[in-house]
Image (spheres, helix red, strand yellow):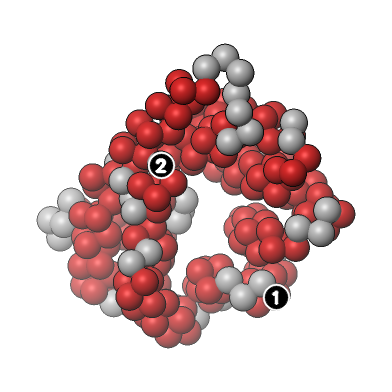
Amino acid sequence: GKMQQLDNHLQQAVETYRHSLQLSGEHPQPHAGEVHLGVARICYEWNDLEAAERHGQQSLQLTRQYDRMIDRFIVSEVFLARLRLARGDVDGATALLAQAEQSARQKNFLPRLPEIGAVQVLVLLRQGQVAAAAQLARQYELPLSQARVLIAQDDPSAALALLEPLRQQMEARGWADERLKTMILQAVALHAHGETKRAVQLLGDALALAQPGGFIRIFVDEGAPMVQLLSEAATNGVM
């Protein structure tokens, strides 16, 4: 299921996850928390935020039951923080991320800090704290976060210089999910740079890749710049 999800085959992935949950029966196994998290992420992407919340909470409850899965417990908290941010609950997202960071440091799960930091950057940008977001993105070496910061700093050319080689790298590795994220952000940066035609063309390519999986939030979460770009795409007959 996770491999299908990474390949952007969301419908197949959710069917695999749900079959796994059926096999678990009434007594969930330790892996069930991870499965619920997978379903939650797909529901989120389909903009079914209620189902995403339900599965995210189930994941959190299940992973909390197993000490050896503390890192998964942290990942569930990070997901729920992202969900709160999508619903406009910035304070709730901030509190969950602080809790996740504290758990990661106390339990010495430091490899989870960049994942937490990526969502913290989104929160800081939402709050207009661009300098703090930039520092965090550099600290954890998060290229997509760094590109978002550069766009927020009205430096789309620097963002493009970062995103083009990153996209090529994702394509070479066959990482479909990261490639799609990079393409969408690259389209936003091109539009901010005044390269509307190229931006619309790239967005069209991204929409074509996203359509079979039913992706929604990956576009919506880019906010007002994506609204403007989608309007341009509709005007140019891309949509």
What's the residue type where badge 2 is placed? Gly
| Residue drawn where x is 32% and y is 72% of the image | 171
Q: Which quarter of the rendered picture does the N terminus lie within?
A: top left
Residue 30: x percent and y percent? 63, 33
Question: Quick check: marks 1 and 2 in contact, CB under 8 Å?
Answer: no
* 219 left or right of 96 in image: left
Residue in the foreground of this view, choosing between 18 and 140: 18
Q: In the picture, residue 129 is in which quadrant?
A: bottom right
Checking the image for residue 1, the label placed there is 2
Q: Residue furthest left?
A: 237
Q: In the picture, residue 145 is in which quadrant?
A: bottom right
* 91 left or right of 75 in image: right
Dot 1 falls on a residue whose secondary structure is helix
Residue 191 seen in render: no
Residue 61: x percent and y percent? 69, 29
Residue 187: x percent and y percent? 33, 68
Q: Residues within 10 Å of mark 2 (few under 14, many from 20)?
A: many
Q: Residues within 10 Å of mark 1 (few under 14, many from 20)?
A: few
| Residue drawn where x is 24% and y is 55% of the image | 209
Between label 1 and label 2, give the one nearer the viewer: 2
| Residue drawn where x is 51% and y is 69% of the image | 144
* 82 left or right of 199 in image: right
How many numbered marks does the figure carry? 2
Residue in the foreground of this view, choosing between 71 and 124: 71
The answer to whether 27 is drawn above or below residue 86 in the figure is above
Dot 2 falls on a residue whose secondary structure is loop
Mark closest to the chain's N terminus, 1 or 2: 2
Residue that badge 1 annotates: 139
Q: CA distance from mark 1 to mark 2?
A: 32 Å
What's the residue type where badge 1 is placed? Gln
Residue in the foreground of this view, choosing between 209 and 195: 209
